[in-house]
Amino acid sequence: MPLDINSKIKGVIFDLDGVIVDTAKFHFNSWKKIASEWNYELKYNDNEKLKGVSRMDSVLKIAEWAEINLSSEELEHAANRKNEIYTELCAKLTPEHILPGIMSLINQLKANNICIALGSASKNARLVLKKIGLLTLFDVIVDGNDVSKSKPNPEVFIKAAKQMNLLPKNCVVVEDAPAGIIAALSANMKVIGIGKSNELHTANLVIENSKNLSIDLLNQISG
């Protein structure tokens, strides 16, 4: 049975893109290339709406914005081509690309026997974690290969909690996307948003960047 401990945090679930490593620009450049082939210029605000969204849901959104009608086979082909571009960019990742504060927090969590999980929409999560040297540090990894519903559906976080053998209320999520914030709250978890407060205002706590993350900060919202 899941542990039921109210006093302190027992598990932390990290999003990947924009939280652990800044691969958001890789997604943007990849989708921008696909969109340009449909005579649509993908804008920054468009890309913000794709954060935390699955690959197929993203390609559907872009096709809608481009006002182009494609068959399911054509959409799947575009999504696969985007992934090829993205993985080529990810091949250049190294541990130096880990965002400030993340390694320090992971070390603190490990020292306190707190479970660490990944909850990401990316189907390339294990590839990215391997490239930056963090793959073996995660107790649980749930990514786009393991879920049928993308954020803001809470499935990815609920599965991560179950695999950690923890109740949702004993978990804290670290996210950078509005869809991820909604998903975490829907899963009955506390959540720290990393980014702009006006975009992530529904989170329990919002910080500008990851460099100030600490176990004490997580415990502030986990009571």
Image (cartoon, helix red, strand yellow):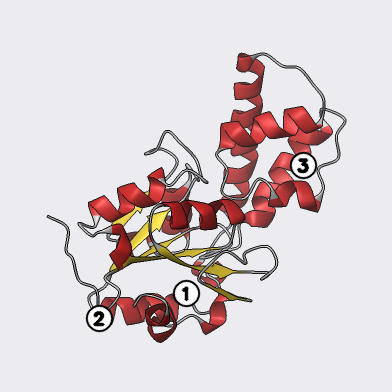
Question: Could you tell whether 112 is left or right of 83 in the image?
Answer: left
Q: Quadrant of residue 93?
A: bottom right
Label 3 neighbour load within 10 Å: few <14, some 14-19, many 20+? many
**Amino acid on which the number 1 mark rests in the picture:** Ile
Callout 2 secondary element: loop
> Split into 4 quadrants, where in the image is the C terminus?
bottom left
Q: Residues within 10 Å of mark 2 (few under 14, many from 20)?
A: few
As measured in the structure, the alpha-carbon distance from the residue carrying label 3 to the one carrying label 1 is: 28 Å
Q: Nearer the viewer, residue 166 or 133?
A: 166
Q: Nearer the viewer, mark 2 or mark 1?
A: 2
Front residue (pair 126, 109):
109
CB within 8 Å, label 3 to label 1: no
Local secondary structure at mark 1: helix
Q: Residue at x 25, y 81 (%)?
A: 112
Give the label on residue 112, or none.
2
Which amino acid type is marked by label 2? Answer: Asn
User: What number is the disc on residue 32?
Assistant: 3
User: Which quadrant of the figure has residue 164?
Assistant: bottom left
- How far apart are the two marked residues, 2 and 3, measured between alpha carbons? 42 Å
Image quadrant assignment for residue 40: top right
Mark 2 / mark 1, whichever is N-terminal: 1
Q: Earlier in the sequence, mark 3 or mark 1?
A: 3
Task: Nearest to the eye among marks 2 and 3: give it.
Answer: 2
Residue 143 horizontal/vertical position (percent): 42, 46
Residue at x 42% of width, y 77% of height: 221
Horizontal side of 41 relative to 212 (left or right) equals right
Horizontal arrangement in the rendering, residue 25 relative to residue 39 (left or right): left
Mark 3: which amino acid? Lys
**Mark toward the start of the polypeptide (2 vs 3):** 3
Residue named by callout 1 = 102
Q: Position of residue 205 (x, y in %)?
A: 53, 74
- In the rendered image, residue 38, in percent from the top left (x then y), is placed at 82, 27
